[in-house]
Amino acid sequence: MTSLILTFGSFAMMALWGLCRPRRRRRFPAVRRRIGNIAFWLFNTTTAAALIFIEPDEIRTPWQLPLGLSLVLGFLLRDLMIYAVHRTYHAVPLLWRLHALHHSDPDVDWSTAVRHHPAEYMLSAAVNWVAVLVIGIPAPAIAFHALCGFTANVAVHGNVRWPPWLERALQPIVITPDIHLVHHSIDAVETNANFGAVLSIWDRLFGTYRRLSDEPVFGVRELDPWEACRPSRMLLTPLTVASA
């Protein structure tokens, strides 16, 4: 129940904020594009729930650490895993074809956060669960990161402008809109930067951090942005895009 409240609360807050104080003027009709994005999310989450049989409480961690330390370490490892998987999706052409649907949204907003191809979603879920089971990350750390990650994901995709002082204060540690919008640029150099999920420290540590210079143009260069707004064409994105 808490996760559902947080999910729809995040959507509602970003949607209302973007409606009242949008950061960018919308270039394409929103309704059909958002319906497609949300439809992918509903399909992905319900399918994943049906396929994953291991509950977080069933994970037994071999770590012999105090609870607080294991939570912090588990959160960091989980975030690093997501950074590594995300970067791999950009580095491997076949995986990029799956991930390109997320980048093809020509008007990035709160709904873009859940715009993922089902094949990408299932593969990422499988890789993450295998890694979690092997590493033995404590279940509370997984749950806490999932809640933080989803909230942050919706927040950084929202068509809103954070106060400059808040951006400056948070950027050294966490992902903010200015950081993540670079990643959605149509420019390949900018797209292949800023892979972090919650924390920005991994991009800084591994040399993939890039500052926002100008408001980027969103999308994937070889994809027609109008076609990218059509739910029927979104599913075929892996067949129409080449490489990162």
Image (spheres, rainbow, N blue to C red):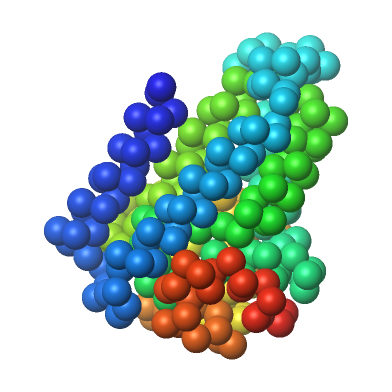
Give me the residue at 44% from left, 46% from top: 152
Give me the residue at 32% from left, 78% from top: 28
Position of 27 relative to 67 (above/below) = below
Q: Quadrant of the N terminus?
A: top left
Position of 156 relative to 10 (above/below) = below
| Observer-nearest of 56 and 151 | 56
The part of the image, by quadrant, that contains residue 223 is bottom right
Residue at the left extreme, as displayed:
20
The part of the image, by quadrant, that contains residue 23 is bottom left
Position of 77 relative to 110 (above/below) = above
Instruction: Say if residue 179 shows up in the picture.
Output: no
The part of the image, by quadrant, that contains residue 146 is top right
Give me the residue at 20% from left, 51% from top: 16
Residue 234, x across and y down, in percent: 54, 69
Position of 150 relative to 116 (above/below) = above
Q: From the viewer's perspective, tell me whether residue 161 is left or right of residue 70.
A: left
Q: From the viewer's perspective, tell me whether residue 67 is left or right of residue 181.
A: right
Residue 82, x across and y down, in percent: 67, 48
